[in-house]
Amino acid sequence: MSDFHEIRFPLDVSLGGRGGPERRTEIVTLGSNREARNARWAHSRRRYEAGYGVKNLAQLAQIIEFFEERRGRLYGFRWRDRADFTSCAPGATPSPTDQRIGTGDGARAAFQLVKTYGGAFSPYARQIVKPVGGTVRVAVNGVEKLAPDASVDATTGLVTFAPGAIPSQGAAVTAGFLFDTPVRFDTDFLEIDMQAFEAGAIPHIPIIEIVP
């Protein structure tokens, strides 16, 4: 992404923010009073409110500087979602077998990192395009692969195997990782009432996910 800056939003502020995934569902009530439901979006999109994490004027000044350098909504950046930033269960350490990211065919060398939610009924696979550098671990049929056999692009989430290490036909390709969510500001106007802020009001700093 040429319009994306590989920098993380101030962590102490984002960890105090609020937000989560949003979906768009169209619901039509039929004449029988039953419902017909249709998913308008194939993928969820996360929204956050960063203002809840601003606790003092020093943090506020930091956010103003960050906002100005991003030119408002113009450039994207990384966001640490406190509720969802790892391939494994909360509190656990990422393992190279956490998430299945593909199946080998003897020729395919590149695999996109994904995180799958659910599994019993209709699992949802989310592309992970902003892994945290140095945290990605990859395995083929449960055997971890290290450099130079496998490498990962931390700016795209693409795992690439070297010519002599391409997964064989039917081999399970898995990975474990930490990741950030690619986002941008959802406003070009950072409105802050300094008098109200001094009294404890929360500035409005909307953040929205950039869907790959």
Image: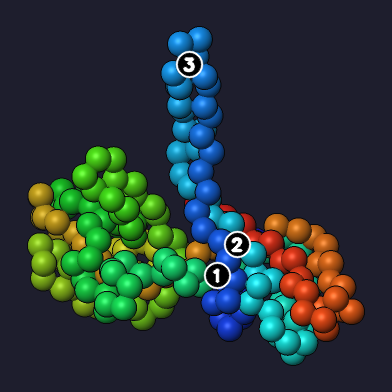
In the rendered view, would you say 67 is above or below 47? below
Which residue lies under the disc numbered 2? Answer: 48
The percent position of residue 14, horizontal first and vertical second, equals 58, 75
Q: CA–CA distance between discs 1 and 2?
A: 10 Å
User: What's the CA distance linking mark 3 and mark 2?
Assistant: 35 Å
In front: 2, or 28? 28
Residue type, mark 2 in image: Tyr
Of 2 and 23, nearer the camera is 23
Sequence order check, earlier mark of 1 and 2: 2
Pointer 2 local density, CA inside 10 Å: few below 14, some 14–19, many at least 20? many
Disc 1 designates what residue?
Answer: 79
Q: Amino acid at mark 1?
A: Trp
- For the residue labelled by badge 2, is the local secondary structure a helix, a strand or a loop? strand
Q: Earlier in the sequence, mark 3 or mark 1?
A: 3
Q: Is residue 154 left or right of residue 50?
A: left
Whole-angstrom CA distance, mark 3 to mark 1, is 42 Å
Which tag is nearer the camera, tag 1 or tag 2? 2
Q: Quadrant of residue 74?
A: bottom right
Q: Residue at x 55, y 70 (%)?
A: 79
Query: Residue 172, which numbered label?
Result: none
- In the picture of the structure, the residue carrying the numbered disc 3 is 33
Looking at the image, the residue that sits furthest to the top is 31
In depth, the one of 22 and 110 nearer the eye is 22
The one nearer the camera, 11 or 212, is: 11
**Residue sitting at x 69%, y 62%:** 206
Q: Residue furthest right?
A: 195
